[in-house]
Image (cartoon, helix red, strand yellow):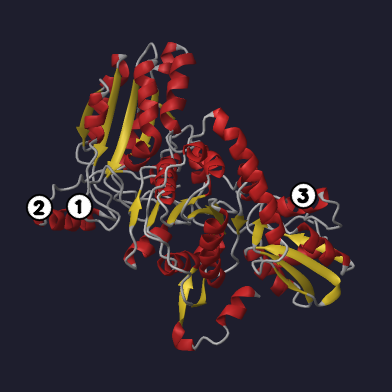
Amino acid sequence: MLSEARQQGATVDERKLLSGDEAVALAAIDAGIALGTGYPGTPSTEILETFGALGGNARWAPNEKVALEVGLGAAFGAARALVTMKHVGLNVAADPLFTAAYTGVTGALVVVTADDPGMASSQNEQDNRRYAVAAGLPMICPADAQEAYDHLLAAVELSERWKLPVLFRMTTRVCHSKSFVARRGGIPPAPAPFFERDIPGRVMVPAFARPAHRRLRTKLDELARFAETTDLNVVADADPDLGIVADGVSYLHAAEAAPAASFFKVGLVHPLPFERIRAFARRVRRCVVVEEGDPVIADALLAAGIAVESKPAMFRFGELDVARVRRILARDESPEPPMPKGKPPELCPACPYHPVYATLRKLDCIVAGDIGCYTLGVMEPYRAMDTCVAMGASLGVGLGLRHVLPPEQARRVVSIIGDSTFIHSGVSGLMEMVYNPPPHGHVVIVLDNGITAMTGQQEHPGTGRSLEHGPAGHVSIEGLVRAMGVEATVVDAFADPAGFERLLAERLASGTLSVIVSRRACVLAAADIRRWDQENATLGAGAGCAGCAGGDR
C-alpha cells in the first residue's frame, strides 16, 4: 500500500496521530500552499482551522463559489491554493469549477470535496466522484490519514504538471478517523507568484472556449495514460479466486472483510486506469467492485467491457463497514437489521431560538426553513418548519409559496434563515423579494447568533471576526437589508418573547416586505464571543456583532 511504503523508515517519534482533515492541513503546510479558503461544512471544516493554526494563510469565504473563485485567482497568479468544502458545497461552486477546467491554472489548485455517505450531517448523500467525470478533472481519493497527507502532496504536483484544478474527494470516515501519519519532505517549492497575461487561455468567450475544451480533452488523454502507471493506484495480487477493486475507506473495510483477496486499490479515480484494471480482473476468477455511494467505478468498468461485479442496489445507501462488505462479497441481499434508534437531536435548552419557534407554531405560520442548527425547529415540541432544501432556499421557497397560495394561506408564510446562511446565499433571495414582491408582502426572520454554530463556531463576514477570531471587516445584515429598501427590525426574541410575537403578527398582517433580525449570541459561544470582541476592541477594532444562527453545510 502506498501509505505503508512511505511510512517505512520513519521512527515512532516522527509519526503523528492525526485525523484525515488534520493530515490534509499538515500536507498543505509542507506543500507550500499560499492560500487556503473555503466555507465551513462538516466533515471538511477542520482542514482550514488546522491549516490556520499551523501558520497557514487561511480564511473563510462567504460561500463555496466565492472560495473557489478566490482560489482560482491565486492559482492564476502562479501560487498554490487549497479550497475546502463539503459535498453539497461543490454544487454551489460548480459554475466556476466547470469553466476552470477549460482555463486551467498556472499554480496548483486543489479542491477538497468532503462527501457524507449516510448523511451524518447533510441533506443528501450525493457522490461527488461524478463531478470529476462531468467537469473533466482529475480526482484523487485517499483511504486514511496517511494517504490524505501523501495524496494531497501528489494532488499539488499533479495540478502543476497538467495545469488543471484537482478534485480531492474525502468522506466523513476519512476526514474524522485518526491514524498515524509519517511526515515527509515537502515537494519542490513553488516559484514566487507572478501574473502572465494569457487572454485566449483565461477569457472564456466562445471563440477561446472551443479550443480550450479540446486542450482539456488532450490533457485528460495524457492523464489516462498516467493513470496506468502512477503509484496512486496500488495492486496486491494474492488469492486468484477473489479480486476486489476498491477506493477510499472502502478499501480498508474490504481488506478486513477479505484479507486473503487480491486487491486493486484505486487512488486516482478519474481518469480510471482501465487497462490495468482489465488485466487485474483477468487474473482472478471473480472480481468485485466495493465502493461507497453510487456504483461510479463499477459502471465505468462494465461500460468498458471489464468483467466485474457491482454491489446490489441496497448497498448504495449509507456508509459501508466490514459487515456490509462481507454481505456484498457473499451476495447477501437479505434485509439488513434496522439501525438502533438514537436520541433525536434537539435545540440546546437555553437556545435563543426557542421563543421564535414557539411563536411560529402559535401563529400557525407556514415556515420555509433553511440549513443550520435552527433546522431543529422542525423537531418536537415545535414542528415549526415546513420545508428545508438547500442553503439560502428559504427565501425563494417562501416567495414561491406567497405567489401562488390563496391569500389566507399566503399571509402566513414566513422564511427563516440563519446569519451565516443569509450571508452565504440568502442575499440573492432578498433581491428576488425586492424585484418580484408577492402581492401580500413577505416576512423574513434572520436568526443571528453571531457565529456559524452548527459546524462548530466558525466565523463569517457578518461577525466582524476572521477565521482566527481576530478583527475583520463586518457586514451589517440589517444595514444590507435596509440598503435594498426593505424594512429591518432588530430584536431579541429570547429577552422579549411577547414583544417578538406582537411584532411578527403585525408584520404578517401588514402585507409589506420586512425582515426581522432576532439577535442573541449562541449559548455555546457567548462567552467566547464576548472575549474575542473584547480582545479585538483592545486592538482598536470595532466589536463584532453578537448575533444568532449559523448554517451547516
Q: Which residue is mark 2?
A: 540
Q: Position of residue 421 (x, y in %)?
A: 37, 40
What's the residue type where badge 3 is placed? Asp
In the displayed structure, would residue 509 be above or below residue 254?
above
Q: In this rendering, would 462 be left or right of 94?
A: left
Disc 2 crowd rating (10 Å Cα; few below 14, some 14-19, many 20+) is few
**Badge 1 or badge 3: first in the primary sequence:** 3
Disc 1 crowd rating (10 Å Cα; few below 14, some 14-19, many 20+) is many
Contact? badges 2 and 1 (CB < 8 Å)? yes
Please tell me whether mark 3 sits on a helix, a strand or a loop.
helix
How many marks are shown on the rendered structure? 3
Q: In this rendering, would 299 be left or right of 521?
A: right
* Farthest residue, direction right: 285
- The span from disc 2 to disc 1 (Cα, nearest Å) is 9 Å
Q: Position of residue 353 (x, y in %)?
A: 32, 42
Q: Which residue is mark 3?
A: 299
Contact? badges 1 and 3 (CB < 8 Å)? no
Foreground residue among 377 and 448: 448
What's the residue type where badge 2 is placed? Gly
Rendering quarter of residue 495: top left
